[in-house]
Amino acid sequence: MALQEWINKTVSVITCDGRNIVGSLKGYDQTMNLILEQSHERVFSQDKGATLNALGLYIIRGDNIVVVAELDEEKDAQIDYSTIMAAPLKAMSHS
């Protein structure tokens, strides 16, 4: 699926350093640099529930992206992230 179809939709991005950033996709370029609006980072911990850190307008370099996925906002709204405990993702690298 082309990123063009996800413009103005909510996406979840996993970065090479294991961050999970969620926001509205506003733009991208040929190197897959992404522009997200109204974005936040979901920070997971094994000791306490996940926290959401507001980022606002955010640019992610294409060479730092592992996965981009459209987010089902209805299902996502039903999840109470403050009750979810999980180990943070480990850093990844392109091979």
Image (tube, grey):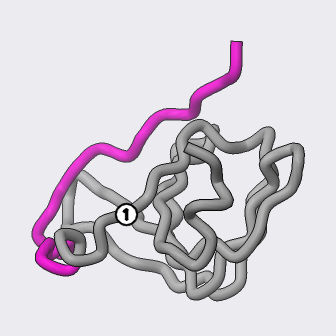
User: Which quadrant would residue 17 be assigned to in this image?
Assistant: top right
Residue at point 21%, 77% (across, down) = 74
Instruction: Identify residue type, mark 1.
Output: Leu
In the image, 88: left or right of 37? left
Q: Where does label 1 land, which residue?
A: 71
In the image, 51: left or right of 84? right
Image position of 24 with respect to 46: above or below: below
Q: Position of residue 55 (x, y in %)?
A: 61, 82
Residue at point 21%, 80% (across, down) = 77
Q: Position of residue 63 (x, y in %)?
A: 80, 39
Q: Quadrant of the N terminus?
A: top right
Q: Quadrant of the C terminus?
A: top right
User: Which quadrant would residue 24 be assigned to in this image?
Assistant: bottom right
Q: Report if residue 93 lies within the magenta region.
A: yes
The region drawn magenta spans: 77-95
Q: Report if residue 76 lies within the magenta region.
A: no
Mark 1 lies on a secondary structure that is loop
Q: Nearer the viewer, residue 7 or 47?
A: 7
Residue at point 40%, 63% (across, down) = 43
